[in-house]
Image: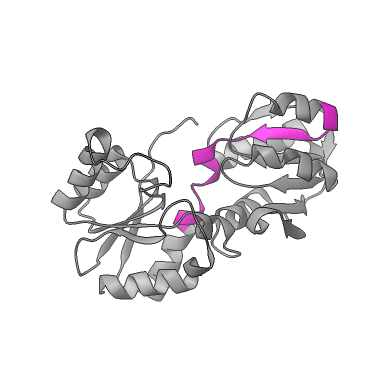
Amino acid sequence: MKTKELIEFLNAYLEADKFQDYAPNGLQVEGSDEVKIVALGVSASLEFIEKARAIGADTLLVHHGWFWKGEPSPVVGLKRRRLGAVIEGGLNLLAYHLPLDAHAVSGNNAELARLLGLTIESRTGFLDLLHVGRLADGPMTAQAFAERVETVLGRKPQLFGDPEKTVSRIGWCSGAAQSDLLDAAALGCELFLSGEVREATPYEARETGCVYLAAGHYATEQFGIQALGRVLEREFPELKCVFIPVDNPV
């Protein structure tokens, strides 16, 4: 299919124009006019790019792309090596950041709910990214839920608070949303899950009684891009979408 057609579909499906983001959503680097093999990834790292080239991909579709606000402009060093690999390979680079976090069907948070067995009762906060719901199969200890998270995400989360606390009402937001812990506690959540942790987070978890799980930025954002790939293969059977994992403990 034509690259332009793919971009138009993704922009419309993810409603990219509605978001004021920290980096451009959509096409970031122009490559081939035709798309046959799409490499899916969380971040457009050099390792990801090289693995994508090795499988013959012509298009990279990622959650974390490039050209973030506030970063240095010169194309030197690491930036030069990454950009050079994309251009030399004739690759398109497409990235969708906040639109992929927020999407109600294929988003990172929607996928976390599906995979972790969570209902979605409400969404609030910045771009409605703070999700609140319940465990569909009933209450369990925070430790038991942490073990479920480890099984699904492939990474052992850090648990802050009482591991034996019984939890049912859960809040979550993928990525770096540890600052939403206080809001989640105020909404009656017994546990809040996100990707990262800051120095103040353990105190906030103990003092609010809301257990916090730091499950990894990469780990909590690996599923939306895969769901998006399934949508593309369903809509465009001629496309082949391949998810390329890259180890990241953060």
Is 35 positioned to the left or the right of 88 in the image? right
The quarter holding residue 210 reads top right
Quarter holding residue 8: bottom left
Query: With 178 as the anchor, is 175 left or right in this view?
Result: left
**Image-based side of 50 in relation to 27, left or right:** left
- Picture colour scheme: one colour
Residue in front for this viewpoint, 175 or 163: 175
Residue at 38% across, 38% down: 246
Q: Nearer the viewer, residue 184 or 231?
A: 184
Is 213 situated left or right of 248 in this image?
right
Up the image or down, 35 lies above or below 249; here it is: below
Q: Please, is residue 151 above or below residue 67 in the view?
A: above
Q: Looking at the image, can residue 139 be seen? A: no
What residue sits 77% from the left and 33% below the top?
Answer: 211
User: Could you tell me residue 44's position as x and y percent?
Assistant: 34, 45
Q: Is residue 202 magenta?
A: no
Q: Residue 166 in the image: x percent, y percent?
A: 85, 36
Tally the numbered discs: 0
| Span of residues in magenta | 207-226
Is residue 19 visible in the rendered structure shown here? yes
- What x and y, as percent, mark residue 155? 54, 33
Judge whether 156 appears above or below 232 on screen: above
Q: Position of residue 66 (x, y in %)?
A: 36, 48
What residue is at 46 percent from the left and 74 percent from the top? Answer: 12
Q: Quadrant of the N terminus?
A: bottom left
